[in-house]
């Protein structure tokens, strides 16, 4: 180690944005040198017609398409392995994902395993998995998001659920970042308001957590660039992306939820998701996302409206936003003016420790999101297990502006009950 970090990096997926952009999917894949593509999607997205539209655009460029529509809404080791096996058997030389974070993350992992074969678990972040790093770039991956949320098209991360260990974890490496994103607001027209609400609240958290993460200079400089963490802490360039995403969240999320035909608002949230993805891909997320892993992972009894699934689960955005007011009340003292700045970017001009929590609660209320983790089936008795699950995300907690102890995490979770 050689003192404080002096270096930060910001990387972005090349983005093509706009109405009708999706019709250029084939052109993009051809440019990337793909001749036989695996189209990774889920049944809901396929039923909405988006997968067919992309398939048509890709085949029009003379590229063969094999469809995998078995994406699990919350990917598991098994569902990811199934996608990887399918991709290997299909002998594809590239990937196009069409869907939300689950589809894009499934394509990332299938690409990883096909490019550098190994059991999925070997690549999962330690301490849950082996933390293996892919030795060279993967096959081309064109990501086409259909929800204005995860920003997965812009990030190096794939999230997965490991029910046996009752934990969510992930794989993160720069080679997992898609080679190109195509972001087309028209694809959100079929989305129920509830899905837009959850996805948009995720965007707001990505941006707020990134903007408020510990400055990159507060880490120690790693011995080798290999050891620089993917989540580096806030820096002037990541801040630009996060700030614009927060502004869009404050201005457009309510409208995007209320009216499926408000293309301006839904388009702004699509773009906001990508902007936030670029920001948090550099700076990183912390307490609300660390708490979200066990909130989504421990109980599967919540039945969200608007999602085409027959099993209970907590949509990612809801699992994240629900602890954010308490989390930011806790971190306020580390950087008061930056917390107030985030509140003002969201359109809330107040000052003091409750300014940002109030802004977030108002947004949750206005888009119909549950404001308490009790809504997902949790009680006081679950707090220790939730703390334990959040603690497993030490990689995230370490970039919080004020690092929480287990007692602090318990207090945040209790305040969110
Ligand atoms: Fe997220």
Image (cartoon, rainbow, N blue to C red):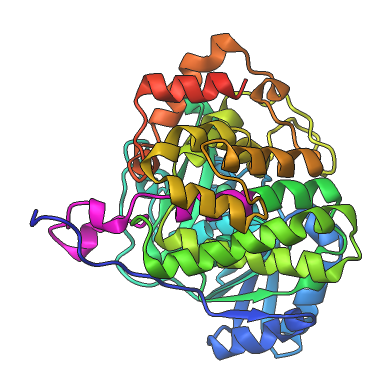
Q: Is 203 one of the magenta-colored residues?
A: yes
Residue 366 location in percent, x, y?
A: 80, 43
Q: Residue at 76%, 89% (x, y): give it.
A: 60
| Residue 89 in view (yes/no) | no
Q: Nearer the viewer, residue 40 or 204?
A: 204
User: 306 or 249: which is nearer to us?
Assistant: 249
Q: Which span of residues is magenta-colored?
A: 202-231
Q: Quadrant of the C terminus?
A: top right
Q: Is residue 360 left or right of residue 3?
A: right
Residue, x 12% and y 58% (percent of image)?
223
What is the x, y in percent for residue 180?
56, 77
Tell me if residue 116 comes above or below residue 312 in the rendering.
Answer: below
Q: Quadrant of residue 136?
A: bottom left
How many marks the image carries: the answer is 0
Query: As rendered, which of 178 and 289 lies closer to the eye?
Result: 289
Which residue is most to the top? 381
**Is residue 8 shown in magenta?**
no
Residue 358 is situated, as x and y percent measured from the top left of the image, at: 65, 38
Q: Vertically, is 394 above or below 29? A: above
| Image position of 163 with respect to 130: above or below | above
Tell me if residue 66 can be seen: yes
Which residue is at 89% across, 60% downward? Answer: 260
Looking at the image, residue 314 sits to the left or right of residue 108; the answer is: right
Residue depicted at x 60% and y 63%: 245
Percent across and percent down for residue 368 are 81, 39
Q: Is residue 194 left or right of residue 398?
A: right
């Amino acid at each position: 180690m050689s003192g404080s970090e002096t270096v930060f990096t910001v990387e972005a997926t090349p983005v093509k944005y706009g109405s009708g952009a999706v019709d250029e999917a084939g052109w993009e894949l051809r440019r990337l040198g793909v001749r036989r593509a695996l189209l990774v999607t889920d049944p809901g997205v396929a039923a909405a017609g988006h997968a067919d539209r992309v398939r048509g655009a890709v085949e029009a460029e003379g590229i063969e398409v094999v469809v995998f529509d078995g994406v699990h809404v919350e990917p598991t080791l098994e569902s990811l392995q199934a996608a990887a096996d399918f991709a290997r058997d299909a002998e594809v030389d590239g990937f196009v994902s069409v869907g939300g974070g689950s589809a894009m993350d499934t394509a990332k992992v299938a690409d990883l395993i096909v490019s550098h074969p190994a059991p999925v678990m070997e690549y999962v972040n330690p301490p849950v998995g082996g933390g293996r790093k892919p030795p060279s770039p993967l096959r081309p991956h064109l990501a086409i998001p259909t929800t204005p949320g995860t920003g997965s098209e812009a990030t190096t991360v794939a999230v997965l659920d490991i029910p046996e260990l009752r934990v969510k974890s992930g794989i993160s490496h720069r080679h997992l970042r898609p080679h190109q994103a195509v972001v087309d607001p028209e694809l959100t027209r079929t989305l129920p308001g509830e899905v837009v609400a959850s996805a948009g609240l995720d965007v707001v958290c990505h941006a707020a957590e990134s903007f408020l993460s510990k400055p990159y200079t507060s880490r120690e400089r790693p011995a080798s660039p290999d050891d620089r963490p993917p989540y580096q802490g806030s820096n002037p360039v990541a801040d630009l992306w996060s700030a614009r995403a927060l502004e869009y969240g404050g201005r457009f999320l309510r409208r995007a939820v209320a009216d499926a035909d408000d293309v301006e608002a839904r388009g702004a949230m699509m773009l906001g998701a990508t902007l936030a993805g670029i920001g948090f891909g550099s700076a990183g997320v912390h307490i609300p996302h660390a708490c979200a892993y066990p909130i989504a992972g421990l109980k599967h009894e919540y039945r969200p409206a608007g999602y085409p699934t027959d099993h209970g689960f907590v949509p990612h955005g809801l699992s994240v936003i629900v602890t954010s007011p308490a989390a930011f009340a806790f971190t306020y003292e580390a950087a008061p003016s930056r917390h107030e700045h985030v509140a003002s970017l969201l359109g809330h001009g107040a000052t003091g420790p409750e300014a940002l929590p109030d802004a977030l609660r108002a947004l949750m209320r206005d888009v119909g999101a549950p404001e308490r983790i009790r809504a997902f089936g949790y009680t006081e008795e679950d707090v220790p297990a939730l703390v334990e699950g959040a603690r497993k995300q030490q990689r995230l907690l370490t970039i919080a502006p004020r690092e929480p102890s287990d007692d602090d995490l318990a207090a945040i979770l209790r305040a969110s009950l």
